[in-house]
Amino acid sequence: MQLIHHGAVEGVTGSCHELVIDNTNSVLVDCGLFQGTELSPGRASSHNLTIDFPTDRVRALLLTHCHLDHAGRIPYLLAAGFRGPILCSEPTAVLLPLMLEDALKMGVTRDRKLIEGFLELLRMRLVPVPYDRWQDVELQGGCSLAVRFRPAGHILGSAYIECRVRGEGADERVLFSGDLGPPYTPLLPAPKAPWGTDVLVLESTYGDRLHEQRHSRRQRLRRIVEHCLRDRGVILIPAFSIGRTQELLYELEDIIHRYGLRDAAAGVKWEELEIIVDSPLAARLTDGYRQLRDYWDAEARRRAVRGRHPLAFDQITTIPDHATHLAAVDYLRRTARPCIVIAGSGMCSGGRIVNYLKALLGDARTDVLFVGYQALGTPGRDIQRYGPEGGYVELDGQRYDIRAGVHTLPGYSAHADQKDLVNFVRRMRRRPRQIRLVHGDHQAKMSLKKSLASVCPESEVIIP
């Protein structure tokens, strides 16, 4: 048995790992897009997404969740000749077609016939698997493989995957963490550590950081919004269409519920503050979240039972089409009306947020609030780094000066921090003999490796 990492080795995107069982059988875990300057070992990149490894022995794709850095290369995988099933959790099977349809429209083709053909093929390949149930994967020869999806607390439908390989006297367990969420993530149950594994492939996005507690980050979100609105400008929040957008809406609804009669800005009470969600994909995914209410955590379900609408409250304005989007950008450029705009993409590398940034970064009344990780080489990282110094950022090949305020609220990350990652391993009754750290920058991996070595000395910690 062998592990080959085809992505998420140099950084935090392009997750793709191959569990090689024998000479004729393997499975892939995730097949994601690259962003920024990251490369795969085979030199694939954000500009060259062609599958750069053989697929003839790959019997199945196991998907941890539907974020594009884990699922975005599926069309390229199918084009490369992969003919096996795609196993995922039941909520992911609902949300994945929405994500990939949008990705194809934005980055590949507007031809509706081609897109529908791909979606039909995708739905034929999808095998939804209930959480916590072992599912056999068909192999050739004498080995057997069973997999189990367990809630990871990252986004709705996210899972870590346990693989049980048997054959020729061997009985090995390999666990792929995917992206683990922190405890107390809005809407989602917290991930629970498994009984144990032999080998663990562990993400390390925030392996060198600690997040603030949820209560304090919600209060900080409120204070930052109130601070930003003192000059009565626009607050731009780049956010991925799935996960972060729904969490922000959930938290903003709670702030409005608690502080509705308090001023968010001079003359604008919280209950009157407009929140613009400018992403058709985010709107469709939020509808999906509402339909999948059975997978929410107990707190969120209680709010819904009491008549609150944490993802569909009165202050939300959804921008339906491109013409309305351009009109909204122009209106806010001319008026700087105090409001919150949530738009994708989360790292400012595309999507509708780019037009807002072009129009408003040069206005000192504007504020940009980052609530998620910004990968090296993305415009979001450049704004985050150079904005406080009055620098500039390149968007679509053109330089834009940054006069807007720039803020970061890392506590809203959908990723576990160092303490959570270490606890995930420490709480296993049978610790892994080997831990392989992926999906993180070098500093994060080194810091997490040191922490794991101190609490799990029996585990060999490897950075591939």
Image (cartoon, rainbow, N blue to C red):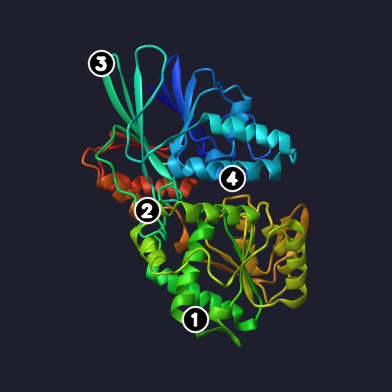
Name the front one of labels 2 and 1.
1
Name the front one of labels 2 and 4.
4
* Amino acid at circle 3: Gly
Give me the C-alpha separation between circle 2 and circle 1: 35 Å
- Does dot 4 land on a helix, a strand or a loop? helix
Q: What count of labels does the image hold? A: 4
Give me the C-alpha separation between circle 1 and circle 3: 64 Å
Q: Residue at x 64, y 68 (%)?
A: 389
Residue matched to label 4: 98
Q: Observer-nearest residue: 178 or 380?
A: 178
Q: Quadrant of the N terminus?
A: top left
Of all residues shown, which one is farthest toward the top?
A: 141
* Amino acid at circle 1: Gly
Name the front one of labels 1 and 3.
1
412 on left or right of 358: left
Q: Position of residue 371 (x, y in %)?
A: 52, 62
One can see residue 350 in this view: yes
Q: Residue at x 45, y 40 (%)?
A: 64
One can see residue 44 in this view: no
Give me the C-alpha separation between circle 2 and circle 4: 32 Å
Q: Position of residue 323 (x, y in %)?
A: 77, 59
